[in-house]
Image (cartoon, helix red, strand yellow):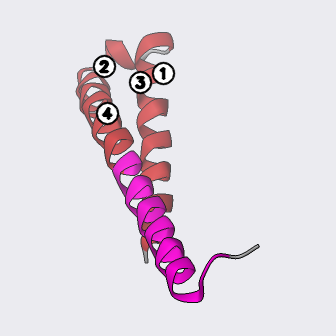
């Protein structure tokens, strides 16, 4: 379930980057609807970047905590 969220966040992040690059280098700034979507994409890209990092860190800490608990139960491995 967690991996699906990470994949979805990464796909949405890529789509946001396409809108931002289209606004800067393409003709998105000439059309009002695309300009508005590009501004929303810029805000969404920041939010998605932060949320992806939060999710990845939660999974990393949970995995490390679980590994540490198993090590304490089984004793140190040499």
Cα–Cα gap, marks 3 and 1:
4 Å
Instruction: Provide the major secondary structure of the magenta segment.
Output: helix
Cα–Cα gap, marks 4 and 1:
15 Å
Residue 65's quadrant in the figure?
A: bottom left
Q: Which residues are magenta?
A: 52-76
Cα–Cα gap, marks 2 and 3:
14 Å
Q: Quadrant of the C terminus?
A: bottom right
In the image shown, does 69 or 42 lie closer to the viewer?
Answer: 69
Q: Nearer the viewer, mark 1 or mark 2?
A: 1
Judged left or right of residue 16, residue 3 is right
Q: Secondary structure at mark 2?
A: loop
For disc 1, the marked residue is 21
Cα–Cα gap, marks 2 and 4:
23 Å
- Mark 4 neighbour density, 10 Å: few (under 14) some (14–19) many (20 or more): few
Q: Which mark is residue 46?
A: 4
Residue 50 image position (x, y, % from top left): 33, 41
Residue 69 image position (x, y, % from top left): 46, 78
Q: Residue at x 64, y 76 (%)?
A: 76
Cα–Cα gap, marks 1 and 2:
15 Å
For disc 2, the marked residue is 31
Q: Who comes first in sequence, dot 2 or dot 4?
A: 2
For disc 3, the marked residue is 20
Residue 20 image position (x, y, % from top left): 41, 24
Q: Residue at x 50, y 60 (%)?
A: 7
Circles 3 and 1: CB atoms closer than 8 Å: yes
- Mark 2 neighbour density, 10 Å: few (under 14) some (14–19) many (20 or more): few
Q: Which mark is residue 73?
A: none
The vertical placement of 39 against 29, above or below, is below
- Mark 1 neighbour density, 10 Å: few (under 14) some (14–19) many (20 or more): some
Residue 2 visible, this orientation:
yes
């Amino acid at each position: 379930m967690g991996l699906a969220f990470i994949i979805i966040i990464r796909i949405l992040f890529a789509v946001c980057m396409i809108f931002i690059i289209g606004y800067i280098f393409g003709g998105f700034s000439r059309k009002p609807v695309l300009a508005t979507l590009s501004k929303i994409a810029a805000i969404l890209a920041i939010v998605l970047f932060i949320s992806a990092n939060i999710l990845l860190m939660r999974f990393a800490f949970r995995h490390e905590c679980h590994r540490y608990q198993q090590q304490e139960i089984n004793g140190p491995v040499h």
